[in-house]
Every structure is written in structure tokens, then in C-alpha cells.
Amino acid sequence: MLLRIDSFFYYQFKEIIECRHHRWYKIKHGGEILSLSIWVLRMLSGVISYKISNGHNDDDDVDQNQYWRMDPFCYYRYVSNPRFFFHALMFILMITLLGIVGKITFFFCSTDSPTFSSPYEYLIINLEQYRQCRRPQHEIATIKRQIFKKNWNKLGENRFIPNIVRKMLTLLLTKYRMIIDKVTIELDPYKWSKLKRVDVKQTIMPDDRLKVIKFLSFVDPIICFVHICLIPPALFIIIDYNVKIITAVDEHHYNIMYRLLFAIDSIILVHNIIVVIQCALFFVILSSGCTLLNYSLILRINRLLQNLAQYCRSMKNNHMKRKYRLLPLPQRQQLARIYREHGEICNDYMNSYRELWSKALLFYLVLSVPFDAIGLSAYWLENLIWIDLATVNLILSIHALITFFSLLDLAKQTKAMHQTGDYFPIILYSIDLLPFNDYSSLSLKLKMDDLYDRLKYGKKYGPRISLLGSITHQFILDLFATYIGTFFFVLPRI
């Protein structure tokens, strides 16, 4: 668990890259994995023992020695709502499993490969360079006064607005502008232009770097808000857990030692919940940051190719002499750069998904089937209290929205990767007019033909899932159909 929530992603990523060989790092995250593993064993033992005992009532002496009656948390869930007991334990079991996989995937993998080193450069190093290039506070205050004056004069054109309303609107507009354009207002263009480029293979423009910085600046307050919202439920869990367990035990067990053990157990429970949530937040931000940059780069390539295609189409339509329809040298050099950039993006996708993302996505999708089946089967339960129903609705809604929109975004990236091939026919026609006596022209012809064939008839580039293939819109439809069939197969067996 990371306590620096003001810049959570920045400090967490720096800890993974720079401190992974330290002893305290291994003890900290190894202890968290051990704590989560113990909870997995507890929940699994509770589910198995509950199924063996067939959920007998408390008055049955035969089942008094069952594990689910002796484990404090299992018994707490049973006392809270016996009908929701099995579903609650299965929810916690699978969420904890996801947390363990996330901890092992992100905190104990090799960070020497470009899968981690490249995002570290254009996310963390880029953010540090931006912080070095901030304007002084007096310059920012001057810009703020200029924005206020501009808004004041603009609203002053309407004579029907009272001065007090005009001042309030001006303050609101100024505040809105300072929030929306915070990155560009605080950035000193002169210092920014003197910085060296980030050490990655792709050609990253200053606009691409600013997009990443704006994304991280937008995410930081959201993460702080999420952590603050966790405080009331955490306090409720600790208090409710201790009250219900202490009132349920026998009188001779009602002593200070048991209270202390129950308090420690409830604190460990809350700690594990925060660890899993922080791991999920890190996963979402890291994947979104990598996606944002690669998608921005591929869109820029597609825009350049679209302009080249329009240029080649205009040359073809103009009835000029043959030598004037040849593709000029600057455009040929631009095509060579586009070929190299597209290859670097494809390699980045293949390496990152082969080493990190594809296996994690496969495990997530496989575990999502019983997870959703258990959640939806809870709606058939009778006498479900409102807090359990609200918990089920919240968990299923967040899970469904994250899964659906993430897959759609990944499919959109795959489409953008292969949309590059749509602009090649007219460009290839112009390249075919080039003479073969120039080695660079011949090399360009072969490269463009090869890229066009790979994009149109080869395997899909872009995001992919291990054993399942590339993520496309057709893949999402097939996955949805398989999901429904598997759901109806799993549901009767719960």
C-alpha cells in the first residue's frame, strides 16, 4: 500500500523501477502478497466447508466445528446475511486473486525490458522535465490577471449584466480557464524547448508529451478523491466487524485479547482492500498512458498518409507530363520515416503485450465469467439487504463498464493500426512510377509493398490477448457470445 496519494502513479512507478532491488521493497510487496494469499486460503476454506456442511443452522451441533463457523470474517459475513454468505466469499476470493496476479505482474517482473523502460521515460521522466520547466508563481499570477481582465472586458460588452454578476462570472471563467489550460499556462516555452527528447525509439513530438502530462494531471485528483471516498466504508467495516463478532462470541471469550485480534483482523482486511484497489488503479493508469501515446502516434501517421494520398490523387488526376507525376523527394523521405515509425509502434505493441498485458488480460477475462455469474445469481436471492444489493450493483457496474470500454478502446487501436493500409493504393501507384535505377526508390517500393501486404493480408497488429488473438470489434462480438454461453453453463452450478 502506498501512502503518497497526492501523486500516486508517479511515486508508485518510480518505486517499481528504482527500488525493486532493495530489501525493503521485496519485504513490503512480498508481505502484501502473503497477506492476500492467506485471505484467499481463508475464503476458499470457508466456501468449501460451507458447501460440505450444506449451510446448516446454528443449532446443529454436527456443524459447530466447521471452518466457516470458526473463521472470524467468514462468521461475520454469515451473521450479516446468511443468504448472501456464499456469494460474498466468492466475490472476495476472486477479487483477491486478481490482486495477487496484479502484484506479481507489476511489482516482481523484469523492468529492464522496453515494456517498462519506455513508459517510464515518457510518463515519469517526461513529468519530471515538465516540473523543471514550470513558470515562477509571479508569472502565473500575471497570466491569471490577464485572463481575468480579458474575461471582464468580454462580459462588459453586455450592458445588461450587473457588476456583481459580471464579477462572479469572470471569476468562474478565469478559474475554468486556469484548470483546463493548467499545463500550458504553467509551462515555460523557452525552458521546454531547451530540454532533450525522451529516450524512446518512437518520435515523440512536444504535443504528444503535453498530452501525457495533461492526462496525469487529470488523473491525480481523481485518485485522491477515490482514496478519500474509501475512508467511510473502511471505518464502517472495522466498526461493524468488531461489533458483530464480539456480540456473537460466548461470554467467556469476551475479553481484551479477542477484541485486539478482531481489531487487527479487520485492519488487515481494510489494508488488503486498499492494496487491491491501488493495484487496479495503477493497472488502469499505466495501460491508459501507454495507449494514449501509441494511439496519438498512429493517428499522426494516418493523418500524414492521408495528406500524401490526397497529394498523389491530385497528381494522378492532373493531366501533366509523366516526370511531373513522380513522387517528389521530400514525400519519399516522409514515407520512409512513416515506415520506420509504424514499425516501431508495431514492435512496441508486440513486445509489451507478449511480456505483460496479454497474459494479464487473459486471466482477467477467464476470471470474469464466474465473477459475473456469481454476481448476477445474487439477484435471485430472497431477503437481500440493501447494502449487499448496493455492493453487488456497484461491483458489477464498475466491472462491466471497465471491461466494455477497455475492449472497445483496444479494438479502436487495432483498427487505427490497420487503417494505415487504406491510404496505400494511390501512394503505391505514385511509387510505381519511380525509376528503378535509384536504389533508395527501389528500397522504398519494396518496403511499402511489404507493409501494405502485412496490413491487409497478414496477422493483426496492436493489442492482443494470449491464446485468443488480436482485439478487434469482431473479437468483442465473439467474446460476448462466448461469455453468454459460458455464463449459462456456470450459473446452474453455483
Image (cartoon, grey):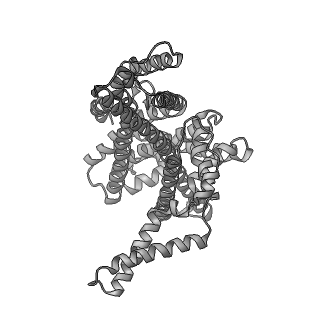
Q: In percent of the image, x 39 and y 82: which residue is there?
A: 167
Q: Is residue 87 left or right of residue 35?
A: left
Q: Quadrant of the C terminus?
A: top left
Residue 46 picture location, percent across and down:
47, 43
Q: Nearer the viewer, residue 23 or 36?
A: 23
Q: Picture quarter containing residue 54?
A: top left
Q: Picture quarter containing residue 367?
A: top left
Instruction: State the residue lying farthest toward the front.
Output: 321
Q: Is residue 453 left or right of residue 143?
A: left
Residue 104 picture location, percent across and down:
58, 38
Q: Nearer the viewer, residue 86 or 424?
A: 424
Q: In percent of the image, x 33 and y 28: which residue is there?
A: 315
Q: In percent of the image, x 37 and y 38: which residue is there?
A: 407
Residue 47 picture location, percent across and down:
43, 41
Residue 425 picture location, percent across and down:
33, 23
Q: How many labels, in total?
A: 0
Q: Picture quarter containing residue 303?
A: top left
| Residue 467 seen in this snapshot | yes
Q: Nearer the viewer, residue 281 or 270?
A: 281
Instruction: State the residue lying farthest toward the top.
Output: 437
